[in-house]
Image (cartoon, grey):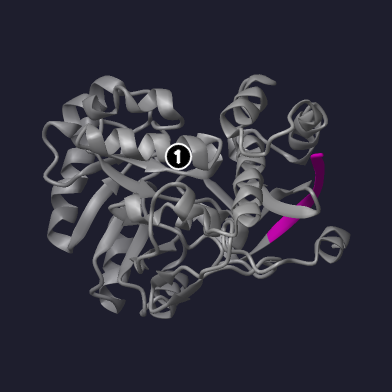
Amino acid sequence: MFKLSYSPYTLQNKYVFRIAGNARSSTPLMLVRISFDNICGYGEASMPPRYGESHQTAAEFLSKVDLSRFKDPFDLESILGYVDSISPGNPAVKAAIDIALHDLIGKMTGLPVRSYFGLSAVPMKTCKTIGIDTPDMIAKKVQEAAEFPFLKIKLGDDNDEEIIRVVRENSDQPLYIDANQGWKTGEIALEKIEWLKEENVEFIEQPLPAEQLDDLSWLVARSPLPIVGDEGIQRFSDVRTASEFYHGINIKLMKSTGLREAYKMAQTAKMMGLKVMFGCMAETSCAIGALAQLGQLADWLDLDGNLGVTNDPFSAHTVKNGTVYLNELPGIGLKEPDWDQITKI
């Protein structure tokens, strides 16, 4: 019989995290545990306030979840279809349930979740994200990230040129650029992209507001660098028209409602000729470890959300020199946590 437990948690950042129009020093989480036959699976919802979920909304949603109607943990389509139908929205807390269920069935079979999806463990290069900050702090963060093969640089305020100058004074690493919808017209975005093309940039993530579809369509036809949709790509239904506005999509568990839908999004995007990026919020090793199980499907990885926090209660895969190495543990790869201790914090 299923048993669902959950507990609020606050994840603390090592540094204040700033993007265009937003800054925070911590992130509210909801940690989830689902047990069946004395085997436990773990999940989490990471809920940056700008996306509308909170400890309160997550608790309200979870109080409505009744898993007792299901007898087979392997019937994920039925279970997760039911969870999704409880109410609209709430993608992060739905992802927490999805992650915990995948972790559970992995442990029940003794296999890593990647095997469930027919994938293997390959070393995966991830970027390190550098948020908007003062020149001195950007220089410090870039120097600390010297071992990573790529840097992801947040732009979109009025100091883009200064940020890139400081980065290039301290590093020659290839860059992923994320404007977080900060450039307001197609013409401005194209001018920025043509400049960034000379700075060893791999792609541009969400250069324009997601609702400016005409501008995005105009830009995607002209950009000399790939355009990747993030805020403009939330769930599977968005993939259908993604190629009209983007060259690739950024899939995050907290947007997609979990591994089940993230896998479908990635496979469909690849069939459509779109590039696939896996990204994250500020998260623990639980959610990062879960998405890393699908890492073989990605062209680009931004799975550093657990590397810039100070109180990660979980432990999963290792990262060496910016490369993710999955372990052989069943489920999502977590070392068994002390749930009672975590939920007391």
Q: Relative to the observer, which residue lies in front, 160 or 224?
A: 224
Q: Residue 162: x and y, percent? A: 31, 62
- Locate residue 311: give its quadrant: bottom right
Q: Amino acid at mark 1?
A: Ala
Q: Is residue 284 visible?
A: no
Left or right for 117, reference 337: left
Q: Relative to the observer, which residue lies in front, 185 or 308?
A: 308
Q: Residue 48: x and y, percent? A: 62, 45
Above or below, 200 against 51 in this view is below
- Locate residue 53: give its quadrant: top right
* Region of the chain picked out in magenta, as a range: 1-11
Give the tally of numbered discs: 1
Q: Residues within 10 Å of mark 1 (few under 14, many from 20)?
A: many
- Locate residue 76: give its quadrant: top right
Left or right for 41, reference 194: right
Q: Is residue 216 magenta?
A: no
Q: Residue 94: x and y, percent? A: 64, 35
Which residue bears the numbered disc 1?
A: 262
Q: Is residue 7 magenta?
A: yes
Q: Is residue 105 visible?
A: yes
Left or right for 52, reference 262: right
Q: Quadrant of the N terminus?
A: top right
Q: Secondary structure at mark 1?
A: helix
Main SS of the magenta part reads: strand
Q: Quadrant of the C terminus?
A: bottom right
Residue at 69 percent across and 53 percent down: it is 42
Q: Relative to the observer, which residue lies in front, 78 or 154?
A: 78
Q: Residue 228: x and y, percent? A: 29, 41
Above or below, 141 against 48 in this view is below
Residue at 31 percent across and 33 percent down: it is 268
Residue at 59 percent across and 56 percent down: it is 331
